[in-house]
Image (spheres, helix red, strand yellow):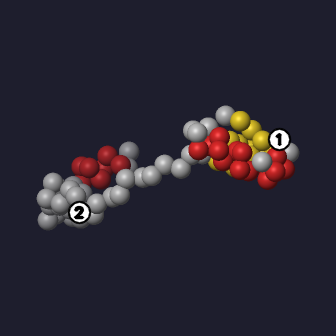
């Protein structure tokens, strides 16, 4: 992972972006302290709403109070 200072990043942004598009990660530092990282962009898969519908049924007593013995275990 290459580290460059802010001035170098501004001066050579196109060159740095070519390196990033090839898979390299670039850290931009100010005063020797990292402040940002440029990484290759990756598409995230589209989430499909409701894909697991019917896989799990929420029981009718889902939000019922816990039994006393279970509650007691939390107060030990």
Circle 2 packing at 10 Å, graded few (<14), some (14-19), many (20+), is few
Tag 1 and tag 2, C-beta contact below 8 Å: no
For numbered disc 1, what is the local secondary structure? loop
Q: Nearer the viewer, residue 58 or 55?
A: 55
Residue 64, horizontal then vertical, whole percent: 21, 64
Q: Which mark is residue 44?
A: none
Image side of residue 29 versus residue 51, left or right:
right
The residue lying at 48 percent from left, 49 percent from top is 42
Asked whether 20 or 53 is in front, the reply is 20
Q: In terms of image quadrants, where is residue 26?
A: top right
User: Looking at the image, is mark 1 or mark 2 earlier in the sequence?
Assistant: 1
For the C terminus, give its image quadrant: top left
Residue 8 is situated, as x and y percent measured from the top left of the image, at: 82, 46
Residue drawn at (38%, 50%) of the image: 75
Looking at the image, residue 38 lies above or below residue 24: below
Residue 65, percent from left and from top: 24, 62
- Quarter of the N terminus within the rendering: top right
Q: Residue at x 23, y 63 (%)?
A: 50
Q: Tag on residue 50?
A: 2
What x and y, as percent, mark residue 3? 74, 38
Is disc 2 placed on a helix, strand or loop? loop
The tag on residue 32 is 1
Relative to the observer, which residue lies in front, 60 or 73? 60
State how far apart marks 1 and 2 are (Cα). 47 Å
* Rendered residue at 29%/53% (across/down): 71
């Amino acid at each position: 992972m290459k580290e460059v200072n802010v001035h170098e990043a501004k001066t050579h942004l196109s060159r740095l972006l070519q390196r990033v598009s090839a898979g390299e990660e670039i850290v931009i530092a100010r005063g020797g302290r990292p402040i940002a990282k440029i990484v290759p962009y990756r598409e995230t898969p589209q989430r499909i709403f409701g894909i697991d519908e019917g896989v799990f049924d929420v029981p009718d007593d889902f939000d019922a109070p816990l039994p006393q013995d279970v509650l007691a275990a939390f107060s030990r």
